[in-house]
Image: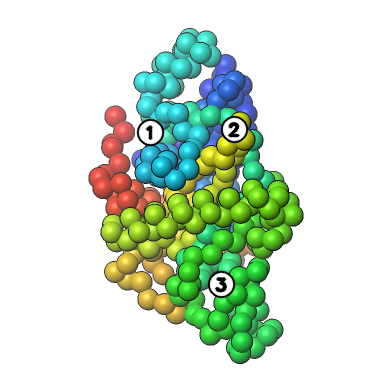
Amino acid sequence: MKVVRSIDIPGLKKHTSGKVRDVYDLGDSLLIAASDRLSAFDVVLPGGIPDKGRVLTQISMFWFEKTKHIVDNHAITSDTDEIVEILEKKCGLQNASDYRDILRDRAMIGRKAKAVPIECVIRGYLSGSAWNEYKELVAKCGNSGEIDLHGVKLPSDMVESQKLPEPVFTPATKETSGHDVNISADEARHIVGKELVDELERLSLAVYKEASEYAMTRGFIIADTKFEFGIIDDKIILIDEILTPDSSRFWSVETYEPGRPQEAFDKQFVRDYLLTLDWDKTYPGPELPEEIVLKTRERYLEAYRRLVGHDLPPVH
């Protein structure tokens, strides 16, 4: 199976290359193409996961459409024919059709926006970095009374993967290198302003609530997720990706059991494998065995299948 490590289009102005996406500047919009690269512990690993970029783009487009009544988003189109036509007519890329196959299903055009410099994290369950921080606080403070997790008050007797009393807004900084840093909502208000953060919290919780309720009907728990927002003409919109296996934790309703790690339908599966290795989490990362690559691919495809309701279309 083919792995697309990069999407290189000479003749277009490169905007940025992130851990997963290659982004091109089209003037008032961006061409955003998701590769099959996979990062873990902030290191882009060698190789990649076949079809991963296609899953990320198509799941994002599904959710953008499903949540646009709550908050607008940057998506213009992910239709390959429309993208090629825009590249030819608007950007003057005469050989745009040569890139049709590599762009298919994995590329979208989105409106340019001024990015808000915080990650909007919503947690419905105690897992990941929040669970690790929670354990440390309980060890320091004892298991009596309340635990203050970045401004969120929690009981001191919770277990891993336990559902929180209600979903909580736990923002993080957006770091250019290394881990994003978990902060409180009040700290976020100091960074970008109270009025903006209050609205970001409201919108994030509303999108999470609707998405979680839908996902439950498809056999999935969305344990947590993160959103990125931008501003166009003083209007807040969703940007980047939304509710994908890269930005969220998906658990199976059937096998969910508090008190332990859960079966993951996201890149946590790779993180769990890497934790079994003697690797110091620095570049370069280890090559993933074929078995791990294929199992990870199947989890991404299963996430798409369950959420969208049909298989990812095959590559022609």
- Residue 290 is at least partly visible in this image: no
Q: CA distance from mark 2 to mark 1?
A: 26 Å
Q: CA distance from mark 1 to mark 3?
A: 35 Å
| Residue at 57 percent of width and 40 percent of height | 236
- Residue 187 is at least partly visible in this image: yes
| Residue 138, placed above or below residue 73 | below
- Residue 200's x, y, as percent? 58, 50
The kind of residue on which mark 3 rests is Trp
Question: Which residue is disc 3 drawn over?
Answer: 131
Mark 3 vs mark 2: which is more N-terminal? 3
| Residue 134, placed above or below residue 190 | below
**Furthest-front residue in view?**
195
The kind of residue on which mark 2 rests is Ile
User: Who is closer to the viewer here, 154 or 82?
Assistant: 154
| Residue at 39 percent of width and 21 percent of height | 82
Label at residue 105:
1
